[in-house]
Amino acid sequence: MPTLEEIAELTGVSRSTVSRVVNNDSRVSPATREKVWEAIQRKGYRPNLHARGLAAGRSNIVAAVIPGGISNILADPYFGVLLSGIASAADSRDRYLLLSLSDVDFKHRVDELAQQGAVDGVVLSSSEEDEPLTRALLSSGTPFVSVGRNSDGRVSYVDVDNRGAARKITAHLLRLGHRRVATITGDPIATAALDRLDGYRDALEAYGLPIREQLIFEGDFTEASGRVGMRSLLEHHPDAVFAASDRMASGALNEIRAGGLRVPEDIALVGFDDIPLAAEMDPPLTTVRQSAKQMGETALEMLLDLIDDPSGPPRRVVLPTQLAVRASCGSKLKSERKE
Amino acid sequence: MPTLEEIAELTGVSRSTVSRVVNNDSRVSPATREKVWEAIQRKGYRPNLHARGLAAGRSNIVAAVIPGGISNILADPYFGVLLSGIASAADSRDRYLLLSLSDVDFKHRVDELAQQGAVDGVVLSSSEEDEPLTRALLSSGTPFVSVGRNSDGRVSYVDVDNRGAARKITAHLLRLGHRRVATITGDPIATAALDRLDGYRDALEAYGLPIREQLIFEGDFTEASGRVGMRSLLEHHPDAVFAASDRMASGALNEIRAGGLRVPEDIALVGFDDIPLAAEMDPPLTTVRQSAKQMGETALEMLLDLIDDPSGPPRRVVLPTQLAVRASCGSKLKSERKE
DNA sequence: GAAAGCTGTGGGAGCGTTCCCATCATATGC
DNA sequence: GCATATGATGGGAACGCTCCCACAGCTTTC
């Protein structure tokens, strides 16, 4: 693999000129530019990542950081898709992606990366509001974008409208005539879980219905907690359930079945996320479609903007969601009943 | 963030000595070593990644490469879990992980990374036997480990015993009395798919049964192909189906249902992978448990060994699998029938 | 028509390490 | 007691780039 200097020698110009061509500096004559490009192509020259990083103080590497431990977090398709969004955007913008899933000494390592300029910026998939990492990143001055809202005024983030979407899907259940609508929440440490619960409350209030604490079960997004939650809720005879994740909805469905009840005839069920499985469930799950991929792409684009101009004001982007109405909420059933 | 030189000045020793301490070189007196360590700790010094990479020609960065395009490949829990295995092993061995999912100019970018010494090695999740990337890596001399077997004698790989596992699970169906056992294969470009098909054939032969081409449907691992495949197989009245992935099994299940048949009473169904969903299906899916996480960890460890000693012979590791017997194969049913 | 501005180019310095060789003590061998 | 090995340390050079300043040759300006 040739170096800048070799290309320079080959074309009879200086190191500097080749560097200018590579970096698209305008102050090179067209003739020289073409000659140099030709040699670069012919020799397959590519600038050395580390040399660049050292000399320029930026590396074209961005880090994607997903806290939550060594656990199989990527088994959750949400994170996988988010990551592939980040990766594909990084790729098309010609950046490298460093992946950090660790938990051990996490803060330390990220700090280290950022502070020594090993990476130019960080996309942080922070589910929690008060992530220690957020503070570390903030105080180190490293450009970063959070996936998931953050109330700190200095933080740029991208999120989906969790609250509005939860309100919409709960209202959908209410519109269908359900009155004892229960919910299984996500892990309350996560802002998304809190927002979805707020949306649920909003909808009930808009319909003038009381918020019954016994119809709210605190889960943690996992299938297991959906099952446990449903078991507990069943004692209070809900006629509909809003699970704050599709995985919890899937667990709830199993539990409803185990109790000898039918979905949607006896209990309507809706979820959140629209994971691939949702459409394949029996009955197909009514849920909220959110594009994790788009969040990832958006986050990366925002990060690159931030790196280019770190002085600008923080940006906050809220992506829209869509209701995916399928059979599990009983839409069809009810409307047929009406006729 | 301080530099080597600053630590040196602070402790009154030279750059070189500090470097030796950092790199655990034995030729430093205990007294000096301790003094330097203290300063390093106190100042929070960490060596600069790029400077190291430039000077030493190795970077402590390894790349994980998953071909297959920008598509949502990580939506498949298999890849997510594999990746988290790689990531956690990289972390515990104090290496950084560069993630590459791209497809555009893929070969080029990986080459570039490897050849300019930006990364020390590559873990390649190659499903295909004759990946162009494999050849590129091989000819560039970059240390790499393939996840998925490769018949090229120069390639180190880690894989699971796909053929043996497929034989075992098919034999399990045969042992239960099924005689018209069909299979839905994975994408035949993937070695895993071919191996699983061979295992299926092995089992039939061991039972002295003919291989019926009409009972073999060529799928591609996806849920959709499972459904399509099942629709086609139904015409030939199988009494059991071995789907080469759990996702295909899930698709097949829906199709069986749509045809008014029951699992396992009318058709027994088994899968492969043991994705989290498998145990939650209705009925729970009998399948082959393979640990993608362990594959990832193993691959990374092998890669680090290879980087340390590139001259050694290629290593091939085949990880064991387990049968996860649940209700979908009708084990219970049949054994009850016997009594 | 001389000062001032552009444009295109070249080369030195420096980024923070590692590696190699030189140096200087001190210990070892005969 | 003098050559020689051994241990601990220092400093130059190099890795491949970017950045800054210098400078030659033109064009513009009043």
Image: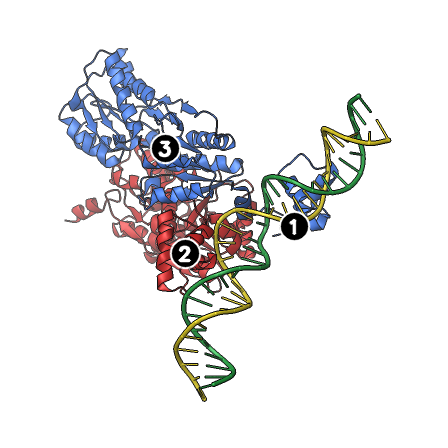
Chain colours: A red, B blue, C green, D yellow
Q: Relative to the observer, which residue lies in front, B212 or B151?
A: B151
What's the CA distance linking mark 3 and mark 1? 52 Å
What's the CA distance linking mark 2 and mark 3? 48 Å
The subunit letter for the residue under badge 3 reads B
The subunit letter for the residue under badge 1 reads B
Residue occupying the point 38% across, 35% down: B139
The mark closer to the camera, 2 or 1, is 2
Residue denoted by label 1: B5
Q: Amino acid at mark 1?
A: Glu
Tally the numbered discs.
Answer: 3
| Quarter location, residue A264 | top left
Same chain letter for marks 3 and 1: yes
SS for callout 2: helix
Residue denoted by label 2: A22
Q: Is residue B152 visible?
A: yes
Q: Is residue A192 left or right of residue D22?
A: left
Q: Is residue A219 left or right of residue B259?
A: right
Location of the N terminus of chain A (image quadrant): top left
Q: In the image, is residue A271 above or below residue B81? A: below
Looking at the picture, how far across and down is residue A140, in whole percent?
56, 55
Please tell me how crowded label 1 is: few (under 14), some (14-19), or many (20+) other residues with Cα within 10 Å.
Answer: some
Q: Are marks 3 and 1 in contact (CB under 8 Å)?
A: no
The subunit letter for the residue under badge 2 reads A
The mark closer to the camera, 2 or 3, is 2
Q: Is residue A57 visible?
A: no
Residue denoted by label 3: B276
